[in-house]
Image (spheres, coloured by chain):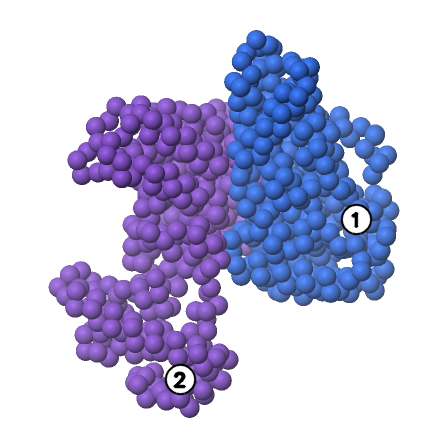
Chain colours: A blue, B purple
Amino acid sequence: MQEERHSGLIPRFMEGLRKSREDIKKKVDLLLSLGNKPEPEMLEELEEVLITADVGVGTSLEIIGVLNERIKQDKGIVGERVREELKSIIREMLDGEGVKNILEGRPSVILVVGVNGVGKTTSIGKLAALYKRKGKRVLIAAADTFRAAAIEQLEVWGQRAGVELIKHSEGSDPAAVVFDALSAARARNADIVICDTAGRLHNKKNLMEELKKIQRIINREAEGRIRETYLVLDATTGQNALAQAKMFKEITDITGIILTKLDGTAKGGIVLAIKNELDIPVKYIGLGEGMEDLQPFDGKAFADAFLG
Amino acid sequence: MAFEGLTEKLQQTFKKLKGKGKLSEKDVKEGMREVKLALLEADVNFLVVKDFIKSVTERAVGDEVMESLTPGQQVIKIVKEQLVELMGSVPSRPVFSSSGVTKIMLIGLQGAGKTTAAAKMAKYFEKRNGKSPLLVACDIYRPAAIKQLQVVGEKAGIPVFSMGDKLKPVQIAKAGLAEAKKNGRDVVIIDTAGRLHIDDTLMAELEEIKAKTVPDQVLLVVDSMTGQDAVNVAEAFNNRIGIDGIFLTKLDGDTRGGAAISVKAVTGKPIKFVGTGEKVEDIELFYPDRMASRILGMGDVLTLIEKAEQSFDQEKAAELTRKLKSQQFTLDDFLEQLNQVRNMGPLDQIMGMIPGINKGKMGPMDIDEKELAQVEAIINSMTPEEKNNPSIISGSRRRRIAAGSGTRIQQVNRLLKQFEQTRKLMRQFAEMGKGTKKGRPGFPFI
């Protein structure tokens, strides 16, 4: 992962966030060029910039509060340095543990959850390809047995990535699919199992209970091994993503976020609020529909891209 | 359901205003600050919020407080009216082309819910408007997207036209229209692939489909959880392709749904339908006034009544009334009624429509469908004799029923007590309803 990060990932990342960056950059540039503007007004407008990026009112206020403190303490923070300071506050807020090295125990398990339409299946396809490229033996579990043609969709991704897939028929018990996949992984000596799940709104009690059961099976069957549960979030989503993260965290052992669709104009600022309030770090970002459009998250690049 | 958070906020805000004799400029300003925060947290676009606050403030400060209202109520009234206006004032109504074939094209971002929306609309038009829809599968890009439409089409009992993923979408769309003509289908719904509004190639593809098929309506499908970016997305699709309306999806979640306001504000195009669940029947027309009422905590009584009317079998209801009047209301009837209430949709949805019930306070998961299943099990474990005459259910019978239904004796006791209360209550309803319409039974569970 380290060497990948230095071989052109950041330019790609920057490209993905170009649109967002341009918008925000323009605004920040304008703000900072008005050097003689009264300070409270500038801070208020920077706060608006954050709100427009879906950071949310609470976290935006907090970030600007910290910025204000630093400006008060260091009179040298003016003009361009305000931007740098804001960037470092954002970076610090996003700072979290990176992706775990999957070799430590085998087979490791990644459970992928989220609401409908965020890009779980696509992300799994990309994740499988990523591990396959690293020479791992990957098994995917088609445990979205609910949505029409979800299994077929995952099969196509499995073929593209060249990885094996465990499936039952549509409508069958997703927990049973996961159980079988974990047994198969042991038998076939796989390095990693990635489990797809049906999209579910976090306020649907029965569906969340089903997820709890799946997590329980994984915790039992893969005890002592590396277990990750990734919540997939659509960068286009607003403040509701916070409610999603809260509820999915309550039900499963969320260890990180995959932030998808950052190749649009959405800024995905809600991950700041989520990290700040729930301490869930972003692990990957999705930048398109291609097989290689999934990148490990880099807080510095994100902060840089965020404010131009 | 969509706006509880906002509802709660506004209620809190105006609690402060209530009880004051006059509405001062300061009061309004203070109230508006919280309305602004609430709207932002509800994901209404920042600029839209600014405009909204400005117009409400202008109206509120200059306004004379009506004699019948407290100043707080007056502000709520203005906020509500402005919200309704912003969302389009008039309720949506399906419109069909006079040419005989109505062509509808669905467009939007990936994952917005186009395919599900397509099937829901088709089913809706078939059921409510007596139409014969055809679904046309033009998403050749996402793996298994065509298969997905075929499966949901089959579930809904609507034919799906597809030509695989090798032809260009515009060719498939045109062939779909020809197919509809040949088979006498009078509504054609074209499902297109999800795409980013900044993807020039794919946006050009939509332009071409539109040009070649000349749809009567292009609907933009928007996820109700969308944040600030909703305005950019809607503006881009509207400017480049031209849209006629919006299909708002996933409103069964707990999102406050401010995107509804944003999207309407920037495009000026009405919200036509809302999606409220995963089932093909989970679709409703959009009523701006109801949505605004919901925002303001006035509940959504009209939607509730409409749902009730669809789900309640009128004949059964009449029979029930007859039984009530002759005091023959049994546990079987109770169960029947329970099932009718359940048919109206998930209980938490129904609860959200009732004024005075604040779902936010109840927590999102407080209504347990499981409990209802237990009630059903208990009643099913009774003998016909017991169901008809619950007064004979002695202690030993209660133990047997509890064992038979896998419940505890306390639950059986509670149910019998509830039943007795319901019977009493319904007798009163029946008395009240004498000579009025339909004799609709009450809702014992809510």
Residue shown at 69% from the left, 36% from the top: A94
Specify the amino acid type for callout 2.
Met
Quadrant of residue B335 in the image?
bottom left
Q: Which residue is mark 2?
A: B382
Residue B254 visible in this rendered orientation of the protein? yes
Residue B131 placement, left or right of A73:
left
Quick one: label 1, few (<14), some, or many (20+) residues within 10 Å? Answer: some
At horizontal 75% and vertical 25% (from top left) the residue drawn is: A11
Tell which of B169 and B340 is nearer to you: B340
Label 1 resides on the chain identified as A
Label 2: few (<14), some (14–19) or many (≥20) C-alpha neighbours in 10 Å: many
Residue A7: % across, % down: 83, 30
Mark 1 in CB contact with mark 2 (< 8 angstroms): no
Horizontal and vertical percent position of residue B183? 43, 48
Marker disc for residue A76: none
**Which residue lies most toward the bottom here?**
B396
Front residue (pair B388, B157): B388
Identify residue type, mark 1: Gly
Which mark identifies residue A162? 1
Question: Please, what secondary structure does the residue beneath circle 1 have?
Answer: loop
Distance CA(mark 1)–CA(mark 2): 57 Å
Residue A46 is situated, as x and y percent measured from the top left of the image, at 57, 22
Quarter the C terminus of chain B occupies: bottom left
Chain for mark 2? B
B27 versus A169 height, above or below: above
Q: Is residue B402 above or below residue A156?
A: below
User: At 83% across and 47% down in the image, what residue appears?
Assistant: A101
- Mark 1 vs mark 2: give the one in front: 2
Residue A178 figure quarter: bottom right
